[in-house]
Amino acid sequence: MALLRIDGSHGEGGGQILRSALSLAALTGRAVRLENIRARRPKPGLAPQHLTAVRAVAMLCDARIEGAELGSQTLEFVPCRPVRAGDYALDVGDAREGGSAGAVMLVLQTVLLPLALAEGTSTVSLSGGTHVPMSPAFDYVLDVWLPTLARMGLRAELSLIRSGWYPVGKGEVTLTVQGGRRTLRALRVEDRGVLQSVTGRALAANLPAHIPERMAARARAVLAEAGIAAAIEPAVLQAACAGAGLFLTARYDHCLAGFTALGRRGKPAERVAEEACVALLAHYRSGAALEQHLADQIVLPAALCPEESLFSVERISPHLTTHAWVVERFGLARVDVRPAENGTGLVRIRGNPAGVCHAHP
Ligand SMILES: Nc1ncnc2c1ncn2[C@@H]1O[C@H](COP(=O)(O)OP(=O)(O)OP(=O)(O)O)[C@@H](O)[C@H]1O
């Protein structure tokens, strides 16, 4: 079959196009050629996190790869066998001399679905940044993304060995995936139901204990003003450099929503707390089911379900529409993203009725 060409400058033009194309190439056996990788980012091409994702998925399906170098804007990726479950270890820091705090959760998201749909149990050890900007934090994946996938029938467990923050990274997580040629269940949450609880963790590493305590106290106060009682625990983590963040999970009758804010030098703990609470309250007031990040991160699993998924989303992000475009390029699903009331959106994903097509010889 001819190489499927994917233009990495489409829409959001970031790393997600590459990662989803890699997952889908491994799942379907389709050879891909990515061009203009991360063309809309200030430093285009493969960064350490993306290069690690390429190497990771290549290991799963013995792919032949060309262009897998830092800064490369073109990549050919030819899967040579179906995905094999097994024990894998990857370190984002290996992708660049001097190391990297590249987001391991994004690498994890790239390998999870291929492993979940392969026969057998896998363990993946990942090192790098576990709580870094512009990516799902460990806590988000643990509390929101994986439990949502569990509702769709996917079984995986995640544990934190050591947290990793910008700029040093060196965190470590372990993922265990119970694979199998299963059919994923569609996600149908047009209506989220009632807010049942808000919980959270105020985390800090290599910083004084008053920092997580102040984040937790401010978050409780902001949410209480809005009439929401939240159980937020302060905690101190092990790490190779300083870092702090607040992670909130809102549990509705029919869905979960996660909100993250990270600290940095000079940013008061209270401001970190307010940022996460503002995001939670914006979603709460929107009335929609999924928050914007979960919506874009659920497109790929939903595209693999034979049944139709349908959910409302707080806001239609460029990540969401770009992700929809990538899965459509593989011909696996039709994704319809429609604006709805007050800036929210409604997403309908009609997966391939035959399930994933394993096209390997
Ligand atoms: N606070 C957050 N909580 C949960 N997920 C997040 C958060 N911030 C970003 N993400 C997710 O991280 C992903 C980032 O994708 P993106 O294409 O920007 O990738 P990237 O590899 O970081 O790229 P680039 O450096 O090219 O921006 C998206 O799926 C987005 O929803």
Image (cartoon, rainbow, N blue to C red):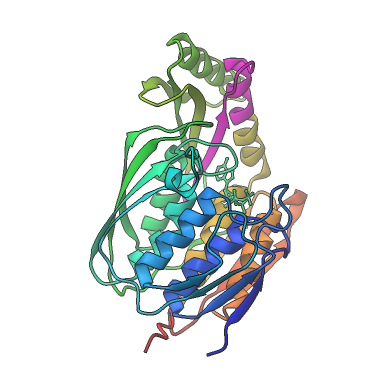
Q: Which residues are magenta?
A: 253-277
Q: What residue is rendered at 48% in x and 74% in y?
A: 25
Residue reaching furthest to the front: 97
Left or right position of 285 against 120 = right
Please name whichever residue, 123 or 81, is drawn nearer the observer in this view of the structure: 81
Residue 5 magenta-highlighted? no
Estimate the x, y position of residue 28 in percent, counting from the top left: 45, 79
Instruction: Indicate the quadrant where residue 241 lies.
Output: top left
Residue displayed at 50% across by 67% down:
22
Q: Position of residue 183 (x, y in %)?
A: 36, 74
Q: Is residue 42 left or right of residue 70?
A: right
Q: Residue at x 39, y 79 (%)?
A: 80
Of residues 320 and 70, the one nearer the viewer is: 70
Query: Residue at point 54% right, 59% down?
Result: 69
Would you identify the image quadrant in which residue 228 lies? top right
From this view, report whether residue 347 is shown above or below residue 99.
below
Q: Position of residue 340 (x, y in %)?
A: 73, 58
Tally of numbered discs: 0
Residue 273 counted in the magenta span: yes
Q: Nearer the viewer, residue 95 or 279?
A: 95
Q: Is residue 143 left or right of residue 88?
A: right
Q: Quadrant of residue 269?
A: top right
- Compared to residue 287, the image places residue 304 above or below, namely below
The C terminus, quarter of image: bottom left
| Front position in the image: 230 or 195 | 230
Residue 275 visible (yes or no): yes
In the image, taking residue 34 as reference, residue 120 lies left or right, namely: left
Whole-percent x, y for residue 167 in the image: 53, 31
State whether residue 289 appears in this view: no
